């Protein structure tokens, strides 16, 4: 009988021991990097990691292994604040990196100035994905509010990508209305009346459009639009480039405090700088993000037509835009009262 | 007098049975079939390939590990708690019973957030944990904690009614014959509850492996490290890897089926459903 008691005691001890996990530093001189990123970069960083690991091995002889975490940009930022030990973050918005700097003080407030191009090595823009042959004849933003056109875009309250969609629509409304905010608001209000379902995230909206076959046009990231075409059926969709759109600059940053604790500062910095090299920029373009390097961009000019673009600075920066458009009681809350019946 | 059920007309009975069956087929059988159809949509080799991916294998390993820790833990706790509740009288007994039910009534997302608030870097114990280089949240211990919390009530809920029904006579007899507390438990109580216990463990295990919400909050979603099977299914689905997603999902579904078969086997072999009439 006593034996059984010790058995249980041993089992409990084993469980407790199993709960205390040591930090994940590499044996044999190898190093591990945790890149906490947002959803649509899975394919991009798969390619970047392989290329960088090879280069780092060649340059320093050290093996670098990557761990990836993907999720909604805001959620990922929150996780890093709560202790997810990211060595680098590669998020959708500067706003989400600012939050980490501000609330958890894991990196300095001036992080955006530490790398070229506002710490955004690649950009993207908002385009339209329509069904093959463009049966509803959608050419520009004005066609989205024609009778009988259904538009798929996620909810800007929950999705970072959807905020860009909203701002792009706003930019069009403002330009078409001769620069008037009232005209812009009238246009977006009309536009969201054509949205039958507001998904909570970008991938959800893509699935709604592509898999469930809902809607005539998906407002999407350029990279997502190309990817949907590639992954889900070449020849099923067409990409329509509108007359005006937004320039999204996804941010990358080393999370200093974590990198220091893991001893990965050097490799983390080199990793992000690699994104700016011609090789890194080429991978970026191959994964349908717009490269910053003019030479690389020129090579992919057919993929990325020139568009008139607004940046977040035209909206006063994320903090202002967030408070004005997407906060509770903001413009979006006032114009959106559910789908048009 | 109350009307006997058999006084329903045969037509009405058939309609009722038909509606019941249709409902089952639509909402239970069909989705299950879809999972397997999708998993094998591109053939057996693609299925095997999807399961064999390093990240998928890591997810399977992690899920098994988490279940292997949390199920025995909850098993021990469940037996101890039920024993205390049914064999002894003490103050706060009903409070304890309500507390055991708490994880059933709390949304799993909230459960996960509780642990983030406690062990996260900005939480109560966060700074202390960081200072001692202990990782709880966004690592395996956090996933285990969340799973233990969510699967807490399963074993206790199964055996409390069973023990209550059996009463204390056997134990009192054993003690009066000079058995120690441990002997009484091992030779008298445990044999009486073993099938209920097994049933509870089965349910607990099924939930431990299938839990999504709470684990999603504390996991950090690091591929190959902190992704459990349900989280991995979501990731694969979001990557447009439908075969992969449904292949892993079909493993989870198979687990549910095995659980169901085992449960039916238990009921059939030991007339267990009669013993559970109190539940």
Image (tube, rainbow, N blue to C red):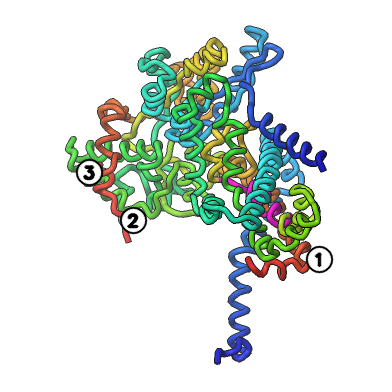
Which residue in the structure is indicated by mark 2? A339
Between the C-alphas of marks 3 and 1, the distance is 69 Å
Q: Quadrant of residue A140?
A: top left
Q: Is residue A94 visible?
A: no
Which of discs 2 and 1 lies nearer the camera? The answer is 1
Answer whether residue A191 is visible to the viewer in this image.
yes
- Give SS at disc 2: loop
Question: Do the residues bearing badges 2 and 3 touch, measured as CB atoms within 8 Å?
Answer: no
Residue B216 to residue B250: above or below: above
Q: Give SS at disc 1.
A: helix
Chain at numbered mark 1: B
Above-or-below relation of A126 to B39: above
Q: Chain of mark 2?
A: A
Q: Are marks 2 and 3 on the same chain?
A: yes
- Tell me the CA gap for discs 2 and 1: 55 Å
Task: Name the chain letter of the residue that bears numbered label 3.
Answer: A
Q: Which residues are magenta?
A: B198-212
Report how many numbered discs are placed on residues in the image: 3
**How busy is the neighbourhood of tag 2: few (under 14 within 10 Å), some, or many (20 plus)?**
few
Quarter of the figure with the C terminus of chain B? bottom right
Which residue is pictured at 63% across the width and 17% down the height?
A25
Who is closer to the viewer here, B7 or A318? B7
What label sits on residue B269 in the rendered view? 1
Residue B172: quarter of image: bottom right
Neighbor class of circle 1 (other Cα within 10 Å; few <14, some 14-19, many 20+) is few
Residue B5, position in %: x, y?
61, 86
Residue at the image position 39 percent from the left and 21 percent from the top: A101
On screen, residue B60 above or below B19: above
* Left or right of B166 in this view: A319: left
Whether discs 3 and 1 lie on one chain: the answer is no
Tell me which residue sits at (48%, 16%) in the image. A257
């Amino acid at each position: 009988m006593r034996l059984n008691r010790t058995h249980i005691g041993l089992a409990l001890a084993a469980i407790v021991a199993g709960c205390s996990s040591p930090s994940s530093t590499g044996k044999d001189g190898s190093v591990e990097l945790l890149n906490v990123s947002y959803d649509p970069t899975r394919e991009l960083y798969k390619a970047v990691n392989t290329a960088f690991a090879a280069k780092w091995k060649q340059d320093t002889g050290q093996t670098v292994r990557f761990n990836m975490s993907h999720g909604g940009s805001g959620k990922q930022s929150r996780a890093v604040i709560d202790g997810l030990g990211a060595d680098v973050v590669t998020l959708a918005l500067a706003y989400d990196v600012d939050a980490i700097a501000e609330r958890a003080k894991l990196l300095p407030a001036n992080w955006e100035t530490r790398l070229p191009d506002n710490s955004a090595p690649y950009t993207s823009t908002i385009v339209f994905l329509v069904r093959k042959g463009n049966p509803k004849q959608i050419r520009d933003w004005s066609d989205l509010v024609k009778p009988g056109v259904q538009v798929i875009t996620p909810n800007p309250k929950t999705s970072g990508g959807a905020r860009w969609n909203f701002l792009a629509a706003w930019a069009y409304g403002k330009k078409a209305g001769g620069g008037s905010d009232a005209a812009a608001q009238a246009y977006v209000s009309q536009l969201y009346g054509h949205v039958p379902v507001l998904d909570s995230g970008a991938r959800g909206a893509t699935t709604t459009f592509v898999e469930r076959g809902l809607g005539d046009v998906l407002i999407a990231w350029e990279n997502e639009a190309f990817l949907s075409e590639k992954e889900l059926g070449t020849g099923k969709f067409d990409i329509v480039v509108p007359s005006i759109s937004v320039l999204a600059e996804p941010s990358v940053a080393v999370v200093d405090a974590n990198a220091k604790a893991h001893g990965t500062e050097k490799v983390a910095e080199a990793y992000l700088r690699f994104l700016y090299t011609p090789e890194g920029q080429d991978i970026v373009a191959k994964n349908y993000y717009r490269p910053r390097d003019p030479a690389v961009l020129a090579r992919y000019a057919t993929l990325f037509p020139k568009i008139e673009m607004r940046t977040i600075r035209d909206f006063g920066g994320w903090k202002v835009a967030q408070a004005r458009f997407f906060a509770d009681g903001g413009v979006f809350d006032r114009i959106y009262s559910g789908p048009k019946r | 007098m109350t009307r006997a059920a058999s006084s329903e007309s045969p037509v009405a009975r058939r309609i009722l049975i038909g509606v019941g069956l249709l409902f089952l087929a639509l909402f239970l059988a069909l989705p299950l079939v879809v999972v397997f159809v999708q998993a094998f949509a591109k053939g057996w080799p693609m299925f095997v390939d999807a399961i064999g991916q390093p990240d998928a294998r890591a997810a399977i390993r992690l899920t098994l590990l988490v279940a292997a820790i949390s199920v025995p833990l909850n098993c021990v706790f469940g037996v101890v708690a039920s024993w205390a509740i049914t064999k002894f009288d003490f103050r706060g007994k009903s409070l304890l019973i309500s507390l055991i039910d708490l994880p059933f009534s709390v949304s799993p997302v909230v459960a996960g957030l509780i642990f983030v608030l406690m062990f996260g870097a900005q939480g109560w114990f966060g700074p202390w944990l960081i200072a001692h280089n202990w990782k709880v949240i966004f690592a395996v211990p956090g996933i285990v904690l969340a799973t233990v919390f969510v699967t807490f009530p399963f074993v206790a809920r199964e055996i409390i009614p069973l023990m209550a029904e059996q009463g204390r006579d056997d134990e009192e007899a054993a003690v009066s014959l000079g058995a120690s507390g441990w002997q009484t438990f091992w030779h008298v109580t445990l044999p009486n509850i073993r099938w209920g216990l097994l049933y509870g463990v089965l349910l607990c295990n099924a939930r431990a492996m299938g839990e999504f919400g709470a684990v999603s909050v504390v996991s950090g979603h690091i591929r190959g490290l902190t992704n459990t099977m349900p989280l991995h299914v979501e990731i694969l689905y979001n990557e447009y890897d439908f075969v992969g997603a449904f292949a892993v999902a079909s493993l989870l579904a198979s687990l549910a089926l095995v659980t169901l078969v085992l449960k039916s086997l238990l009921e059939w072999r030991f007339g267990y459903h009669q013993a559970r009439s109190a539940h």
